[in-house]
Image (cartoon, rainbow, N blue to C red):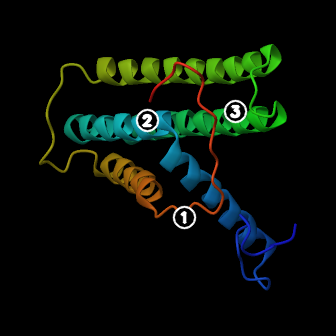
Amino acid sequence: MKDAGRRGQMVTDPRAQPFVRAVAYSLRGVVYAFHTEKNLKRDVWLFTCLAVVEWCLRPSLPQAAITVFVSMCVFAAELFNTAIELAVDVASEWREHPVAGMAKDVASGAVTFVAFGALAIATWLLASNWPWHLWLWSRHNLGAVALVTAWLAAVWAVRLWPYRAEIEIKRPRKEGKTE
């Protein structure tokens, strides 16, 4: 893989290790998605709400680890969906095609399944901690608080990371649609 420089390609140090370059390209893609996809922006806010609930209820460390893992799965599913949609759009030359539409629907359906699973886990978290005690200012389950706080900080760091549009992706608007 060549680093061409300016024309939409990421400029990296040619002496950098392949792993470092791979991580840089991966982060570029994640930052792009977090800045351009409405669903990922919504998911960041939903995870922030979940973190506030976990700070107040203080679930056990295994429960917090499960909710963090499930939230990672939701973010990953959204990233896969974004990648599939972009690849399908390019392959179909931005025109509507029944197979392209079905591919996008299937990818979106996968995200929906993961989101329903996350909702089930959130329901389990709330039910298993009944009766609810607000532990916000206590030292109860500090490991869980640290885990959720670290993951929340990582998510917001990616969300707020400056995005430089090295390539401009303009999807043509469908007639009659306004955003």
Depth order, front residue of 173/43: 173
Residue tagged by mark 1? Answer: 164
Estimate the x, y position of residue 135 in percent, counting from the top left: 15, 40
Q: Which mark is residue 43?
A: 2
**Nearer the camera: disc 1 or disc 2:** 1
**Which amino acid does the dot numbered 3 rest on?**
Glu
**Left or right of residue 86: residue 55:** left
Q: Is residue 125 visible?
A: yes
Residue 60 shows in the view: no
What amino acid is labelled 2 in the image? Asp
Q: Nearer the viewer, residue 38 or 91?
A: 91
Give the quadrant of the C terminus.
top left
Q: Position of residue 149 (x, y in %)?
A: 34, 52
Residue 53 image position (x, y, % from top left):
25, 34
* Label 1 neighbour load within 10 Å: few <14, some 14-19, many 20+: few
Q: Give the x, y percent position of residue 28.
A: 62, 60
